[in-house]
Amino acid sequence: QVTLVESGGGLVQTGGSLELSCTASGRTYSSHIMGWFRQAPGKEREFVAAIRWGAGTKYYSDSVKGRFIISRVSAENKIFLQMNNLKPEDTAVYFCGKLIGSDFAIASAYQYWGQGTQVTVSS
């Protein structure tokens, strides 16, 4: 059984930065993908960023490209999301997910999810 635990959310002003982390239990294989999604009230879960575990290939949504950076520490089975130049529209619950597959931008494709961490950006 895989468990994912996120941390690092909080309240920040527009233009500020936050770093989220996600630690996964169990082994992560090179073909696996770890991703970040977010969900605002009344909206669907939205793709933010993903990283292919073995090659380290990174993927970003257009809305965060150039502002957010996804990274991993393989030895610790951990991923990070560095969020810079935050905007009020980034406010959401952020979820970490693990995918055994290739559809990294599709939430329903992920097999495992963390409990989420709230990010609030004030204007």
Image (cartoon, rainbow, N blue to C red):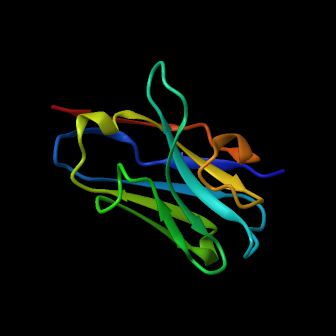
Residue 105 at what x, y percent from top left?
A: 59, 51
Q: Is residue 14 above or below residue 49?
A: above
Q: Position of residue 42 (x, y in %)?
A: 48, 18
Residue at position x 76%, y 72% in the image: 29
Which residue is located at x 64 percent, y 72 percent?
53
State the image quarter where residue 44 is shown.
top right
Q: Residue furthest top?
A: 42
Is 14 left, or right, of 39 in this rendering?
left
Point out residue 34 in the picture as x, y percentages from the top left corner: 62, 60
Describe residue 113's horizontal placement relative to residue 80 as left or right.
right
Foreground residue among 3 and 104: 104
> Looking at this rendering, what residue extends furthest in the right direction?
1
Q: Residue lying furthest bottom in this view?
A: 55
Query: What is the total number of numbered labels drawn onto the structure image?
Result: 0
Residue shown at 45%/21% (left/top)? 41
Residue 64 rendering spot, x and y as whole percentages: 35, 53
Q: Is residue 25 left or right of residue 73?
A: right
Residue drawn at x 57%, y 77% is 56
Pick the quarter of the image with the C terminus. Answer: top left
